[in-house]
Amino acid sequence: MIKKTLRVEGMTCAMCAKTIEKTFENMENIKAEALVSANKVILTYDESIYSLENIAKIIKSLGYFPILKDNLDENKHIKKKMKIELIIAIVLSTPLLLAMFGHIRIFNWLPIPLIFEDGIFQMILAGFIQFGIGRKFYKGAYISIKKNSLGMDILVVLGTTSAFLYSMYLLYNHLFGIELMHPVYYFEVSALIITMVLIGNYIEHIAKEKTEDALVDLINLGAKEARVIIDGEETLIDIEQVEIGTEVIVLANEKIPVDGTIISGSSYVDESMITGESIPVYKTINDKVIGSTINLQEKIIIKATNLGEEAVLSQIIASVEAASARKIPIQRTADKIASYFVPFVVVVALLNFLIHFIFIKDTFTYSFTTTIAILVISCPCALGLATPTSILVGNGLAAKNQILYKGGEFFEIANKITAIAFDKTGTVTYGKFEVTDYIGDKINLDYIYSIEKESTHPISKAVALYAKENKAKLKKISDFEAIKGKGLKATIDNDIIYIGNAKIVDDFEIDINGFREQYQSLLEQAKTVNFLIINNQVKAIYALRDEIRDTSINVIKELKSRNIKTYLITGDNKGVAKQIGKEIGIDQVYCEVLPNEKAEIIKEIQDEGNITGFIGDGINDAVALKQADIGISMGSGTDIAINSSDLTLMNEDLGLIVEAIDLSKATLRNIYQNFLWAFSYNIIAIPLAATGNLSMTLAGAAMAFSSIMVVLNALRLKRHKIKHKGV
């Protein structure tokens, strides 16, 4: 049995999920779990019996749109089709809507063209919407009945078809002289209902679309080819042709194609995409390297060890997929309500007809029109718009303040967050090195500048920039040499000069007594310390550190004041991690952890009963971002981190975390207000329709007004004020 995730468009409510799940329920060796809010179906199946392509065909037969990885353009086509159908529906509904307003006394001043009131004209427009654009509702209703999961399509089909057929009946009577007076038709009711539902579906599609799938981006990180020796010549082969034990050549500035062990050469390797740490790691013979990391300096030869699903990147991809598959703790409120609301309305409408026609002995027309009015007034347009409209307005306000939400889940969960974990590098710190201390004479800074300028190492670049800003002068150097894993060597004015870390001092057994106290002090401050050695004497020391963001301390203080626990989870060493955690006031620090271990720690925090957020910026944070109830990425981080998260802070102001939480709470309140209006409206309107005090025309207008009220209420979110930016 294998587990795979399939993206599926067209799911709009809990009943859609139920329909898909029930389809596979009675099939052997396969199980499906549909996640409406993520547009995904999680499949567990026997690969010897089923293929993903066959499963996709089954789902497509239900009226939904599965997107296979090799057909991602299909999603663009679906969105384009939805947009075109919506525009056509709005254009064709407008004349019918104007005709409806013309029948309502308070709108009799509107200049309505005579053709708009013509029954045949209205029938053609409404028919195109009803049976052309609206045919998918009939298919959805048929399938939901077949699968015994009544959804919103049932109400849409019952209400619109009844209104359309009754209008056809009136038109027939008028055309053949059975009814001499010009009747009032109800074609606009069927067209308007379908149009409003399409608007709701399109808005919801846009909201969902912002939750990008990080898996494709992760897969694209992997190398496509590997350089191997065949018949004595270097040849590029497809990565899938590499076998365990194959010797792979990796040149400078190339991506390491597979996991392996170095058997020849040595070099610095940029492992930031895995570890999140910005300092390249020195690798030599027998050291392990990870596929998709970057070889920075010299040619190396590696022996492939882990391939396919065993590779580190593949394991990260699998972990992200598994974490994506879980359902959020709080399911969408609208979906829960719909599962009870739809059958309730159908029962009420049927009872209404029976009571009027059989027990009260009202005419068929009166009984029928009051029943249609109930179905029309109860169509769940306002209910369907309640969540996506508020989320879109909240998203718009957030975007203006450099906050990017990528789904409705954050709005539901944010007010219940009890713990937030932070990555270190690039999150609570800036993610780049700066010289913080220099102890030595001005002339010595000239030596440092002249030598460091020759290196491309990140530390060398930071030091050279510092020296240049402090007006250091370049000297002529010779015999430049990079000492791997230790530092640099050069000759200036016949003096032999070394620049590097403590390993160089140890190699030459150099006395640092004159700088010992400063050295120890800098180490205690979690700084990287280098020495300038001239003719075997230490002449200067300088320190670098990835500095803490200006807002980190205040954000942690603000979160703790709200009784939110704070954690630091980093791959950095214990000394640095503990010191950074102490300076910013973090409650608990986890250090020297690998990417998958970050996710495991998040899981442990969740198991303690916490609704947990995680904030990171690197590829190494992708799994933890998905595991957390809410993943928050820094906009300056990698695309993988951003796409794996539920929320992105588009600038380096950590104070936006607090504002994002507050804005989400305001949005959730707005959604609940929309629900309150939608239900209050139904509680009042259904009895009015049942007693004949609400005609089908007024029912259609009221239904439209209900949706407009939801949108207007959502727009009130724009008044929300940013209070905590910068904290």
Image: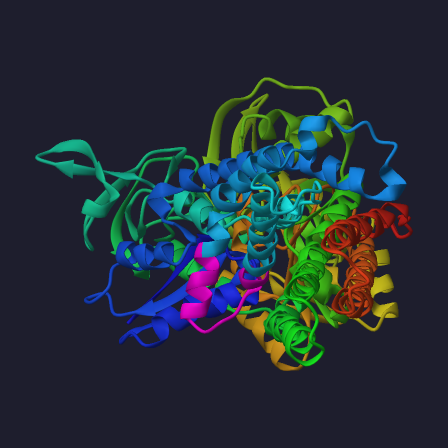
Give the image quarter of residue 610. bottom right
- Out of 334 and 469, give the one closest to the viewer: 334
Q: Which residues are magenta?
A: 139-155
In this view, the residue farthest toward the left is 231
Q: Is residue 172 left or right of residue 634?
A: left
Q: Which residue is painted at 49% across and 71% down in the image?
A: 149
Q: Which residue is painted at 75% across and 71% down in the image?
A: 416
- Out of 170 and 369, give the one closest to the viewer: 170
- Residue 510: in sight, yes or no? no
Give the image quarter of residue 557. bottom right
Q: Is residue 147 left or right of residue 105?
A: left
Q: Main secondary structure of the magenta part?
A: helix
Q: Is residue 201 magenta?
A: no
* Residue 473, x across and y down, in percent: 71, 20
Q: Is residue 326 left or right of residue 695?
A: left
- Out of 352 and 1, give the one closest to the viewer: 352
* Residue 532, x across and y down, in percent: 64, 38
Q: Which residue is painted at 55% across and 26% down in the image?
A: 454
- Out of 314 and 13, give the one closest to the viewer: 13
Residue 690 versus residue 360 in the image, above or below:
above
Give the image quarter of residue 72. top left
* Residue 251, x across and y down, in percent: 33, 34
- Residue 149: in sight, yes or no? yes
Colour convention of the picture:
rainbow
